[in-house]
Image (tube, rainbow, N blue to C red):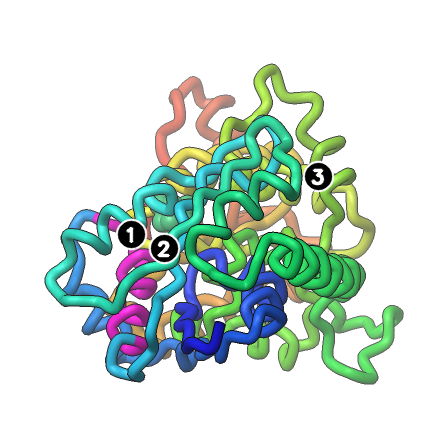
Amino acid sequence: MACKVGIPRALLYYRFSRLWPVFFEKIGCEVKVSDETNKATIDQGAASVVDEVCLPVKIFFGHLDWLSDCHVDYLFVPRIVSIEKKAYICPKVMGLPDMAATAKKDYPPFISPLINNIRGEKDEEYIRELSPYFSCGKKRLKQAWLEAKKEQARYDQKISKEFWIEEGLKDDDPELLNVLVLSHCYVAHDRYLNMNLLEKLKKAKCRVVLPENISDELLERAVKGLKKKPFWTYGKQLLGAAFWFSRMPGRKGAIILTTFGCGIDSFIGNMAERHFKKAGIPYLIITLDEHTGQAGLETRVEAFLDMLRWRRKHYENNFPTYGEYLDTIARDAGIHRAYSCCTSHDK
Ligand code: SF4
């Protein structure tokens, strides 16, 4: 099947960046992955879809628009319901094909297989979902699918062991900080959206830890103590990473990096925040929206890192970013949560 398939570089593309392109290439398609996000992508996406959706979904639509002008034959917009057993993906991701059908632009036809792994579906079920779109036969589809899965597994294995750290920076460097960036993969890896935060942290002598660097087994184990297992895959991943990180040795701080309009982050972020407070881990909350300015973000991050280093040097324990000390004063004075101190510019 010689056709050109467009894959938007947004949302779960960052989770399956090997699986889907390799699969399409193996069955003989030409693959066009949209360029990295830029201002025009965000503006176009915001104009194409309803205002109420989160920023990453707007960006997704910006990529769809961009690909539509690239003469692709099909756009790949899968209906993803679940990517692992007994956990769902965010409802906004599930509804992408429907949102796209009602968007303000005419798109090329979609390839929209259902991806639902809630009961631990077998490969055959995915092949059955994909086969109506292709004429190359189930055998070839299966072979391509298995090879693409292998490629993705190799990549996952590689990134689960790699923290982001500046080359040459030693473990015993007195300036080294461990910084967890608690964020969805499509926020952490979209350099325009997060204003290149990971590189900035690397350059500032931080070892950057992302949820994806922690294996699924460790994340599962980390959330086991909760009364109820998080319902959503990304909720579990973020909370598991927060719990795991608090046991990581070394001087550390966490950045809760969220985007405007994210439903899951609104409460998972709050649970992580309460956990960091309890565990005594300084944290910074950054909420990105269409108007977030580079200078504002840099100032906050620099101040946060300075504070972490300053505390390290002076063993200083008043005015922490997580407000514990101020809470203690308030409690001792009989004032019920009189105020809190938090570095967030949103709360
Ligand atoms: S998890 Fe949050 S950011 Fe991601 S698609 Fe859902 S609402 Fe948007």
Q: What residue appears at the point 53 percent right and 29 percent down from the top-left corner?
A: 328
**Residue assigned mark 1:** 54
Please tell me whether the stretch drawn in magenta is mainly helix, strand or loop.
Answer: helix
Query: Is 323 on the left or on the right of 58, as rendered?
Result: right
Horizontally, is 313 left or right of 323 in the view?
right
Could you tell me the amino acid type at mark 1?
A: Cys
Q: Which mark is residue 259?
A: 2
Is 173 placed above or below 237 here? below
**Where is 332 relative to 109, above or below?**
above
Mark 2 close to ligand 1, CB under 8 Å: yes
Q: Position of residue 333 (x, y in %)?
A: 45, 23
Magenta stretch in the rendered image: 53-67
Q: First in sequence: mark 3 or mark 1?
A: 1
Could you give the CA–CA distance between mark 3 and mark 1, rounded to whole angstroms? 25 Å
Image spot of residue 100 (x, y percent): 23, 55
Q: Which residue is found at the position 77% from the left and 38% from the top? A: 217
Label 3 element class = helix
Callouts 3 and 2 close, C-beta under 8 Å: no
Q: Quadrant of residue 181?
A: bottom right
Q: 75 or 41, which lies in front?
A: 75
Disc number at residue 219?
3
Residue 201, percent across and down?
Answer: 60, 73
